Amino acid sequence: MKKLGLCILVVFFIGVMTAQEMTMEEVYEGVEFDMPKVPEPQFPNYSVSIIDFGAEDGGLTKNTEAISAAIAAVHEKGGGKVIIPRGIWLTGPIELKSNINLHLELGALLLFSRDFDDYKLVKTSFEGLNTIRNQSPISIKGVENVAITGKGTIDGNGDAWRPVKRGKMTSSQWNNLMKSGGVLSDDDKMWFPSEKSKLGYNSSSNFNVPDLIDEDQLARVKDFLRPVMVSILKSKTVLLDGPTFQNSPAWNIHPLMSENIIIRNLDVKNPWYSQNGDGLDLESCKNVLIYNNTFDVGDDAICFKSGKNKDGRDRGMPTENVIVKNNIVYHGHGGFVIGSEMSGGVKNIHVSKCTFIGTDVGLRFKSTRGRGGIVENIYISDIDMINIPTETIRFNLFYGGNSPILEEDQSAEDESRDEKPQPVTEETPSFKNISIKNIRAIASKKAAFFMGLPEMNLKNVSLENAVFQTQQGITAIDADGLTLVNVKVISQDEALTLYNCKNVNVKGLSFKETNSAAIRILGSGSKNLNFSKNDFTDIKNQVRQGKTVSKSSVKIR
């Protein structure tokens, strides 16, 4: 046992040490589907500095007009580089144009204004719904051949915008926040930057969109309508390469309905307490490369979406043809995530050679009744995980908005499983044909949790060549076609629990022998469950069936 743990740690830390070394050619290696080559933007050999247009550093003077003028001038010349030199450059929102490379030199800090009046209300999409929010600090809308490069830092001044739950802060942090101004919720458990922000929260049934008031009243709650920091909308051939993106008002980077995107060599950060402090939310995009990045954020780190409910189904644009390689995630609700807004579908996704360190969940798949959409052809391999406080792998099709680690105002009952099958309609989400292999997870709570819907099981999910050193084993509920091959579970309880699963094949399962059963099978819906007798030394005691499970449903041979 000790030798095994040492071997896993050696493999794990070798993976960490070799991160940030992958070339673009290596990114395409081993991809299971026909992945188009993603073009990089190309720019003329022409550049200007924002200083040439009157910008002043120091963080006291707004440089919105100077930066916008520099962008416009380079655009009119046919394109090139707009340089942000070393220094602190305060600005309001900026909009990039086609053929612009916004380049931040080492030591440059592009700091966005805390003045909410600098940001106008615009029609957009947030959390998969058509809505109205404040303008993003950086907008890339309807353009082609655009980049943000360099070794500088982009800071969205998100602490000025975000409500904060008291339970997410230490006493000293909370006291300092109180001294900064703002107002408290009626129960004193949440801080808001302004009365408008508080009114917006009280006008919402789901925290983020004020759906209890009419659109013509949104100006009254403007401060609540936090923007994503970098909005990439309906654009083509976009490169983000090098900078640090941090402290966003809501999500950090949000490509939406765009194609041919490369995201590499970024450091994406948000405070762990940041509400909706996602790192990257890729929504309804195609032909995307995401590699050599580091994330340390307040919500999901690398998250794929495609619209929510009817808005997403009407849009009908899946997220497809994406490679995710060689990324490191520290804090975040999920390391790699699909959902929950996936109503337009997600398909042809390759994820490999990623490391998750202390992430709430490693691989996270979430949806719920009402979404619709199909998630399929997902290929995940070579993932290292350590100190995951919940599940290293989680499929939850009863997702209701809870954080993986429940917060003070959340209840597990909000996502309780409803066993009664519902009619299958366009609103029924489907997850199928998902391959997960070469997984190593240590010092974590639960190996894996697979839960589909009674009316739409998880279909054809395979887990192969995996080692889990966790407190708890694997649980599968409402899964059809689950395959486990060469899976080692080192846990204190059952290695595998199956409930209402069918067409399951298990071979090469190894586990820690304890006084309790290694395999537990429950539910009258459990059928055609196949195990290898070579995996057991005492079949009678190591495999336990519930009273409602037909004996003929379990085959050990």
Image (tube, rainbow, N blue to C red):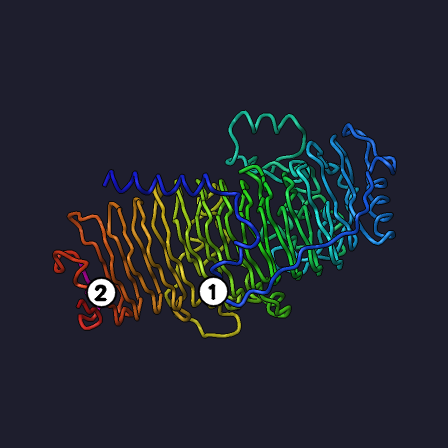
- Say above or below: 267 vs 449: above
Tell me the residue at 79%/43% (across/down): 82
Query: Residue 245 lies in what quarter of the image?
Result: top right
Amino acid identity at mark 1: Glu
Asked whether 309 or 237 is in front, the reply is 237
Closer to the chain start, of discs 1 and 2, is 1
**Which dot marks residue 531?**
2
The residue where tag 1 is placed is 32
Q: Which residues are magenta?
A: 543-549
Quarter of the rendering occupied by the C terminus: bottom left
Q: Residues within 10 Å of mark 1 (few under 14, many from 20)?
A: few
Q: Secondary structure at mark 1?
A: loop
Asked whether 311 or 486 is in front, the reply is 486
Observer able to see residue 226: no
How far from the left and from the top, in percent, is residue 370? 52, 66
Observer able to see residue 365: yes
